[in-house]
Amino acid sequence: MAAQMEQLENSMVKVTVDVAKEDFQDAMQKAFNKNKRRFTIPGFRKGKAPMKMVTNYYGESILYDDAIDIAAQPAYENALEELSVEPFSQPQFEILEIGYDKGMGLAFTFAVKPEVKLGNYKGVTAYRPDDSVAPEDIEREIERAREQVSRLVPIEDRPVQEDDTVTIDYSGSKDGVEFEGGTAEDYDLVIGSNTFIPGFEEKLIGHEIGEQFDIDLTFPEDYHAEDLAGQDVVFNVKIKEIKFREIPELDDDFVKDVSEDADTVEEYKESIRSRLAEEKEKHADETLMNNAIKIVVQNAEMDLPHVVIHEEMERMYNDQARQMEMQGFNMDQYMEMLGLDKQTMMMQLHNPAEEKVKTGLVLDAIVEAEKIEVTDEDRDEQIQKYADMYQMEFDNLKKTFEADGALEMLNSDLTRQKAMDLIKEHAIATDVEPEPEEHDHDHDHDHDHHHDHDHASEDTDHAHEEE
């Protein structure tokens, strides 16, 4: 089963291989055995006619599809072994010749791993954000903690004020006729949140519990519902409850309630400062590494096959589909919600997929250039991290890695991580932020799904203003 390989452009190759007549006839016989009960030949009981009679009656091409399925994969694998070539993409194959008395000729076209010509990867200058902790950062964390333990306190003795939460019934009408989506009961509204159209919240200020009154308003000209945009309307509102958010004082008692390691305000502030400093340093180091890697990839040269990018786009799309399923959506619903189709989404994935593939190739080239290796200790340490993460026994998880053949992937992950660490170690940090990249398409595909879902509700609640 001699195989030949032709080098094509763009790191693609074409492998041709002949399946010997005897081997193809064996595949035809297996295909016949698989399907013989389907064939009816005059003079024979169903499934009893010999293969020669069946092929004479129907034509031997009736068995080709299954025979190709049986013979093509072994031919492909044997050709790869014979030529010592490793595919970097799935193959596309074509039938060059086929016949019971001739055998079969096949051609497989696929990408091979492109050669990477590394540029500078030691000592690149890359942006690292400031990791200092400002006093306002600490105050912001404290305010967030105070709000988390705050409580809504009913107010009985004063009218509505800014920042109050009021429970209201409201009904909107235009020309005396209620409009769809303009009515609600027991709605909790924070005054000053700008949740409703301009003027609504301000006109509740000064009213007291039990009051029922009309508010004259005009919808904005750019309102999303065309039948209401720019229209004069009246909302009838009833104040049913007023609540004020009571935020605890920042004192030692508050600190003891919310902190496990501080007893005083000063200790609490220092604890927050220390945590923020650690978080910001980690974020800054990760940003430095990511920016340095981008520059290293830009410095490298390679002839990247388009098919590899497209396969990565498909993987990324399928990964996103699985994430949607975990959140209770299917991909069609998600794309409909965003007003996208698959072709548009795939276009958005093109640049991220290309960058991901290039980054992996460059890291692999650095691993080879630096002769980076992983040790048994490296592997065991990583497996232990996974064991801790998933609350599994180390020995059981290690056996799973070995049984599933996942050690090769683990080795790849670890060597690439070492290559990234090397880039970061030699990178020269700068506080000059890079100019934003310009792409042909919008690649921000990691949307906040709940946020987008919430926006869909605006079409059915016309007291609310568009965000």
Image (tube, rainbow, N blue to C red):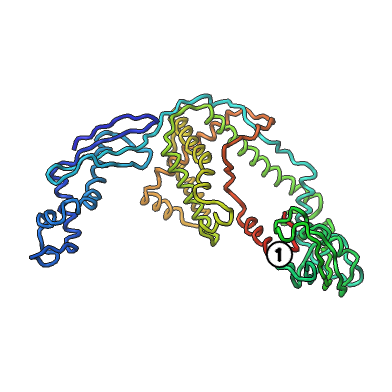
Toward the left, the furthest residue is 43
* Residue pictured at 28% horizontal, 41% vertical: 94
Query: Which of the image's four quarters has the C terminus?
Result: bottom right
Secondary structure beneath label 1: loop
- Provide residue 286's location: percent of width, then percent of height: 61, 39
Q: Which one is in front, 451 or 99?
A: 99
Q: Which one is in front, 145 or 82?
A: 82
Q: Residue flagged by tag 1: what amino acid is it?
A: Asp
- Which corner quadrant of the image does residue 239 belong to? bottom right
Q: Which one is in front, 151 or 51?
A: 51
How many numbered callouts? 1
Relative placement, left or right, of 84 versus 405 is: left
- Which corner quadrant of the image does residue 187 belong to? bottom right
Res 146 seen here: no
Toward the bottom, the furthest residue is 210
Res 165 seen here: yes
* Residue pictured at 76% horizontal, 72% vertical: 186
- Which corner quadrant of the image does residue 194 belong to? bottom right
- Residue that numbered label 1 is attached to: 461
Relative placement, left or right, of 231 versus 437 is: right
- Provide residue 364's location: percent of width, then percent of height: 45, 34
* Residue pictured at 66% horizontal, 58% vertical: 455
